[in-house]
Amino acid sequence: MELSLKGKKALVTGGVRGVGRGLVLGLARAGVDVVTCYRRESEHVASLERELKEIGGEHSIIRADVSDPDQVTELIGECERLHGKLDVLVNNAGTISHIPYAELPFEEWNRMVATNLTSVHMVIQKSLPLLGEGSSVISIGSRSVEAGVKLRAHYTATKAALIGLNRSLAREFGERGIRFNILRLGVIETETLRDLPDDQRQAMISLYSKKSAFGRIGKATEAAGAVLWLASDLSSFVTGAVIPVDGGMS
Ligand code: NDP
């Protein structure tokens, strides 16, 4: 049994940094041609470009805000122009903030819903003409949905909604051979954590490490491993599922 991903075409949203970058690189190393997008210019765009060039393959990094319907249309149009199809779609782009619920501004609620939920709906819906028999749609969920986290009611609400969307789409598009799954991540190390002041970073790592069966937080490469499996035919009978990648977090 082999992954056999060579030559497949993928879109990973929000892939220039964080978890998404690990997913883009993991797919590229497995021989997948990857399109990814980002919202803000940063040094991460050029560094990803360099890394992808070293790996080889037909990759593209496009500036597109997935909470904007017109930019989603352009992004998917670009995927069609470049590759004509999508074998793998990873809805990774997401945002988070920590605000007491009683003080949560309506604008922040709307921003969270637009970025974490409506964007996923728009990207999937506009990608449908490019998704064929055997395509795999993977959305990045969060362990915090079940745990519940203070100051994150708006974030967890959007991630919980992805579960319903995923399950219904799995049923609606099963006959077309398109699979829909969610990776429910625990705490994964990203630049955001690495860039915190030393004491804050250590406190965060220590807090979340204790909750894991391995006594550590996860790496983006470990999320990528699950994406590779879901992208491949090895998971051909898996759909509508929420798969934990959280180090056995309690
Ligand atoms: P980061 O903030 O490190 O990275 C988020 C990425 O998404 C960035 O590349 C960002 O682009 C992009 N992005 C955000 N909003 C948009 C948008 N509107 N349009 C296009 N791109 C956008 O987050 P993480 O890597 O930590 O999180 C990635 C996903 O994993 C999210 O869905 C998150 O909820 C989920 N997750 C992460 C966990 C973790 O521990 N890291 C735990 C559980 C879930 P730009 O660089 O331009 O801002």
Image (cartoon, rainbow, N blue to C red):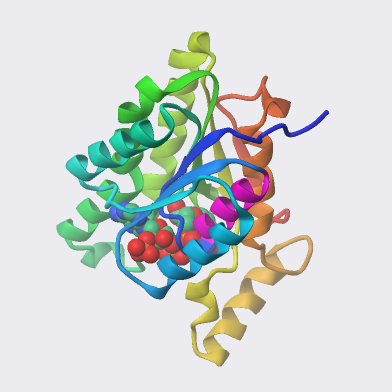
Residue 26 inside the magenta-drawn segment: yes
Task: Please indicate, yes or no, whether residue 151 appears anywhere in the rendered image.
Answer: no
Q: Position of residue 44 (x, y in %)?
A: 44, 70
Q: Position of residue 76 (x, y in %)?
A: 32, 36
Tell me what residue is drawn at x 30 percent, y 65 percent: 40
Residue 172 inside the magenta-drawn segment: no
Magenta segment, principal secondary structure?
helix
In which quadrant of the rendered view does residue 219 lie? bottom right
**Quadrant of the displayed image that contains ligand 1:** bottom left
Q: Position of residue 28 (x, y in %)?
A: 60, 48
- Quarter of the picture containing the N terminus is top right
Give the magenta-colored segment's residue range.
19-30
- Relative depth, front residue between 5 and 111: 5
- Quarter of the picture containing the C terminus is bottom right
In this view, 51 is above or below 225 = below
Q: Is residue 8 left or right of residue 83?
A: right
Q: How many marks?
A: 0
Tell me what residue is drawn at x 54 percent, y 69 percent: 190
Task: Please indicate, yes or no, whether residue 217 appears anywhere in the rendered image.
Answer: yes
